[in-house]
Image (spheres, rainbow, N blue to C red):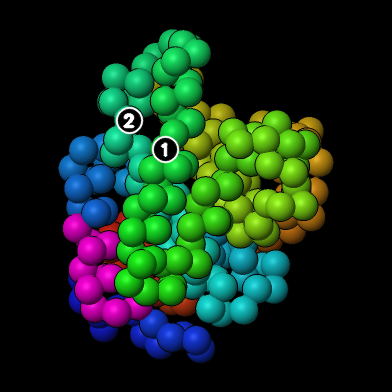
Amino acid sequence: MSSEYCREVHLGDIPEWGVHVTDILLSELKQRDPYTFYHCCRVGRSARRLAQAMGLNEYDQFRLEFAGLFHDVGKMGIPLAILNKPTRLSKDEFFLMQSHVKMSALVVGWLGKEHNFFQSLINPILYHHERVDGQGYQKIDQRDIPLESKIISVVDTVDAMLHTRAYRKALDFETIKEELIECSGQQFDKDVVKIYLQAVRFWKDIKIADKEEMIIGKLLPVAA
């Protein structure tokens, strides 16, 4: 990957060192935990598409692509035995699992010391497990949850349910759709769910890159 893949987008672009560090971090993630790597790529791709459907400008779509890409990078600090545990997590294990959002935010915060673009990714990542009913990881009031986090929350959950894990089998999309509708206004923002369900019918396969993508399509030809 090289800086040529990150073309200028309205307010600026990512410096070459930022692209290089992104490549290194994601290569490490892929080697340690392939599932999370591909999950992050799919979430980044879906977050960009949903941001576009919601009318966000090109720069914010770009940010959502990167926020989705980095949203679970903190799981590199979680033992694989916990990530892949086939049974219910203990209270202590779940507490440790929750820490991945802060670790992910710390990673982009470290990069953000050198460039404002990465600084702008901190809150969308930090709050992507918050709920509009205030019962998320950090019990944040819905008025304080960034729209970007609400977008990532929906596409993150959908992707997780679409793929088999050690603790459960993949669900079909109709079942996932019912879950989204049932949890709308509790776990998820109603407007985000509504627009997602309207837009997803017209999306190409998530394995196929969009020409608007800045980086994911270059990271991996097929985000499978």
| Pointers 2 and 1 in contact (C-beta within 8 Å) | yes
Task: Count up the numbered dots.
Answer: 2
Q: Residues within 10 Å of mark 2 (few under 14, many from 20)?
A: some
Of 206 and 214, nearer the camera is 214
Name the residue: 74% across, 58% down.
Answer: 195
In the displayed structure image, the side of residue 130 where residue 66 appears, left or right? left
Between 34 and 28, which is closer to the camera in this rendering? 28
Residue 5 visible in image: yes
| Residue occupying image coordinates x 39% and y 43% | 103
Give the residue type that dot 2 points to: Ile
Question: Nearer the N terminus, badge 2 or badge 1?
Answer: 2
* Outermost residue toward the front in this view: 113
Residue at 39% from the left image edge and 82% from the top image edge:
13
Q: Is residue 85 above or below residue 133?
A: above
Q: Tell me where residue 81 appears, x and y as whole percent.
A: 29, 19
- Which residue in the structure is indicated by mark 2? 78
**Residue 66: x %, y % from top left:** 43, 63
Q: Which residue is mark 1?
A: 100
Q: Which residues are magenta?
A: 14-24
Mark 2 element type: loop
Q: Main secondary structure of the magenta part?
A: helix
Q: Quadrant of the N terminus?
A: bottom left
